[in-house]
Image: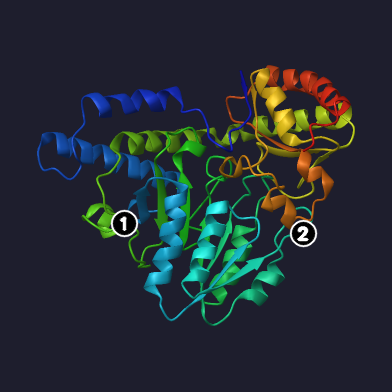
């Protein structure tokens, strides 16, 4: 099997799985319990929090553990909405994750106004448009650090400086960026930032929301006193311990991203040179080193994806959260992409991707595309 769908989820690192198992079998105590097993569990949670904080260059007290990216987004948006009732305007972009766009619709149903910023044909954000969108009653500006489909990187530092100069809260969805870009929250002008462990070789069901020291927003989960009263519920200790180690390993692996980018570029070069009528979306913008969204003209992307899957090759037609939809992704629509959007496939690599796998892809893909096009492209 060749796995090139790492933006959907990554394979948990073997070391992470190995560390999680004792938490399921031996050290299974509740971190809130006062006996020996509870104290041991709480100590493991402390280590995990320190490791995640180190990856982000934040204080451990600023890290709120949760179940993943979607919960982090909900906590950020809904927590700000409830905490600042006099501010009822939110700003985000047209290419955000579907969970963010769903939250925008929820906010409108609550009576808030939401401004959706566009992007150019390469998926880049216009900072001048962002500045014009901010109003005195703006509660929150939210942008992603990097797009999950194209890999296009947003100028978080510049956007944050602009937003903070207006006295507005700034949230960043860093779900795809962590482990693929260095993030320094001691330097970046960010108030809130969410991450998800399964995007950087940790387990599913674990994530975190960074909340800048001094900022108080409403808790998303209400109940017990866990997470300093910011997220109630017994902590998922095995998953969070695994996330801690995954964070530490991701920090150590940042220097190896140049090799991942080299392999990504090698795959793109093979596709563009051997397969006619192809285009890499966002190629002229700064991108994550592991991500390539390729448009294949004259065919349906899902047909090609299924053919690749039959050969043991895993990739996607876009975000895993929108699989099965018949229309081109909202990201490509926002970029103004025409017919090639129907034939888009996303290839996302990881630090475990090998040169041999990329060369195999470069050899297999041209014949498959030619075959599907010869059968009418699989268009529906």
Question: Where residue 167 is drawn, which disc sits there?
Answer: none
Q: Callout 2: helix, strand or loop? A: loop
Q: Earlier in the sequence, mark 1 or mark 2?
A: 2
Alpha carbon separation for disc pair 1 and 2: 37 Å
Work out whether residue 198 or residue 332 is closer to the camera in this orientation and state it: 332
The residue furthest front is 380
Position of the C terminus, as image quadrant, is top right
Does the image show residue 321? yes
Work out whether residue 277 or residue 262 is closer to the camera in this orientation and state it: 277
| Left or right: where 31 falls relative to 159 | left
Location of mark 1 (residue): 221
Pointer 1 local density, CA inside 10 Å: few below 14, some 14–19, many at least 20: some
Instruction: Give coordinates of residue 29: x percent, y percent.
Output: 18, 35
Q: Which residue appears at 30% of the width and 58% of the height?
A: 230
Does the image show residue 189? no
Location of mark 2 (residue): 120
Rendered image quadrant of residue 206: top left
Q: Callout 1: helix, strand or loop? A: loop
Instruction: Give coordinates of residue 255: x percent, y percent.
Output: 58, 35
| Left or right: where 289 falls relative to 271 | left
Up/down of 251 relative to 191, above or below: above
Work out whether residue 235 or residue 369 is closer to the camera in this orientation and state it: 369
Instruction: Give coordinates of residue 364: x percent, y percent.
Output: 77, 19
């Amino acid at each position: 099997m060749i796995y090139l769908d790492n933006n959907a989820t990554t394979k948990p690192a073997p070391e992470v799985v190995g560390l999680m198992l004792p938490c399921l079998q031996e050290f299974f105590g509740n971190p809130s319990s006062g006996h020996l097993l509870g104290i041991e569990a709480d100590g493991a949670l402390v280590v995990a929090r320190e490791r995640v904080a180190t990856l982000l260059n934040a204080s451990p007290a600023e890290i709120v553990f949760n179940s993943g990216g979607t919960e982090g987004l909900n906590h950020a948006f809904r927590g700000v909405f409830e905490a600042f009732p006099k501010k009822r305007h939110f700003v985000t972009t047209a290419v955000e994750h579907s969970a963010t766009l769903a939250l925008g619709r929820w906010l409108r149903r609550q009576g808030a106004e939401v401004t959706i910023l566009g992007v150019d044909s390469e998926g880049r954000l216009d900072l001048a448009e962002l500045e014009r969108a901010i109003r005195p009653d703006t509660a929150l500006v939210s942008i992603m650090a990097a797009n999950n489909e194209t890999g296009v990187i947003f100028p978080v530092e510049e956007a944050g400086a602009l937003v903070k100069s207006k006295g507005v809260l700034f949230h960043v969805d860093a779900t795809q960026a962590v482990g693929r870009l260095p993030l320094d929250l001691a330097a970046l002008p960010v108030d809130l930032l969410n991450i998800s462990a399964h995007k950087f070789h940790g387990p599913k069901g674990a994530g975190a929301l960074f909340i800048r020291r001094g900022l108080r927003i409403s808790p998303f989960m209400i109940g017990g006193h866990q997470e300093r009263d910011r997220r109630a519920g017994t902590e998922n200790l095995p998953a969070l311990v695994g996330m801690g180690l995954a964070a530490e390993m991701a920090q150590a692996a940042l220097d190896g991203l140049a090799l991942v980018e080299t392999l990504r570029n090698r795959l793109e070069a093979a596709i563009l040179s051997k397969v006619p009528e192809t285009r890499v979306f966002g190629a002229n913008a700064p991108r994550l080193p592991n991500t390539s969204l390729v448009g294949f003209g004259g065919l349906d992307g899902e047909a090609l994806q299924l053919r690749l899957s039959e050969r043991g090759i895993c990739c996607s037609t876009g975000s895993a959260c929108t699989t099965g939809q018949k229309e081109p992704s909202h990201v490509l629509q926002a970029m103004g992409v025409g017919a090639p959007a129907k034939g888009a496939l996303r290839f996302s690599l990881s630090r475990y991707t090998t040169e041999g796998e990329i060369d195999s892809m470069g050899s297999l893909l041209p014949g498959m595309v030619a075959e599907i096009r010869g059968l009418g492209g699989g268009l529906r």
